[in-house]
Image (spheres, rainbow, N blue to C red):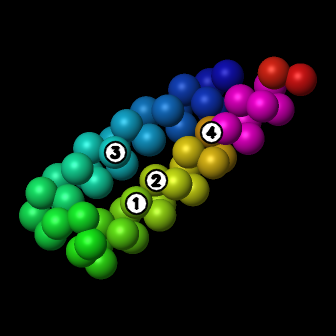
Amino acid sequence: MERRKKLSEEIEKQRKELNKLAELYGLQGKKVIQKSQQLDRLLNLYNQLHNHEAK
């Protein structure tokens, strides 16, 4: 459970950074796409942990 909480906090941090980058570079900016991909990986990991704990 603790790992999921830390991951949730990191997701929120990355989401805020993504929003800032999108404001600076637009949605198609290389940095924005890279940050979005990082966030996707974190969200996938979070979902895997959630599904594993639910079993």
Query: Which residue corresponds to mark 4?
Result: 46
Where's residue 53, x and y in %?
80, 25
Q: Secondary structure at mark 1?
A: helix
Q: Main secondary structure of the magenta part?
A: helix
Q: Is residue 51 left or right of residue 31?
A: right
Q: CA distance from mark 1 to mark 3?
A: 8 Å
Identity, as a three-letter code, of the amino acid under mark 2: Leu
Query: Which residue corresponds to mark 2?
Result: 39
Where's residue 13, x and y in %?
33, 42
- The structure residue drawn at horizontal position 34% and vertical position 45%, both measured from the top left corner, is 15
Query: Disc 2, disc 4: CB below 8 Å?
Result: no
- Mark 1 surroundings within 10 Å by alpha-carbon count, few (fewer than 14), some (14 through 19), many (20 or more): many
* Pointer 1 or 3: first along the chain: 3
Q: Is residue 41 above or below residue 46?
A: below
Q: Is residue 51 above or below residue 21?
A: above
Residue found at the far left of this picture: 24
- Mark 2 surroundings within 10 Å by alpha-carbon count, few (fewer than 14), some (14 through 19), many (20 or more): many
Q: Is residue 7 above or below residue 20?
A: above
Residue found at the far bottom of this picture: 30
Q: Secondary structure at mark 4?
A: helix
Query: Which residue corresponds to mark 3?
Result: 15
- The structure residue drawn at horizontal position 12% and vertical position 57%, both measured from the top left corner, is 23
- Mark 3 surroundings within 10 Å by alpha-carbon count, few (fewer than 14), some (14 through 19), many (20 or more): some
Which label is found at residue 4?
A: none
Query: Disc 1, disc 2: CB below 8 Å?
Result: yes
* Pointer 2 or 4: first along the chain: 2
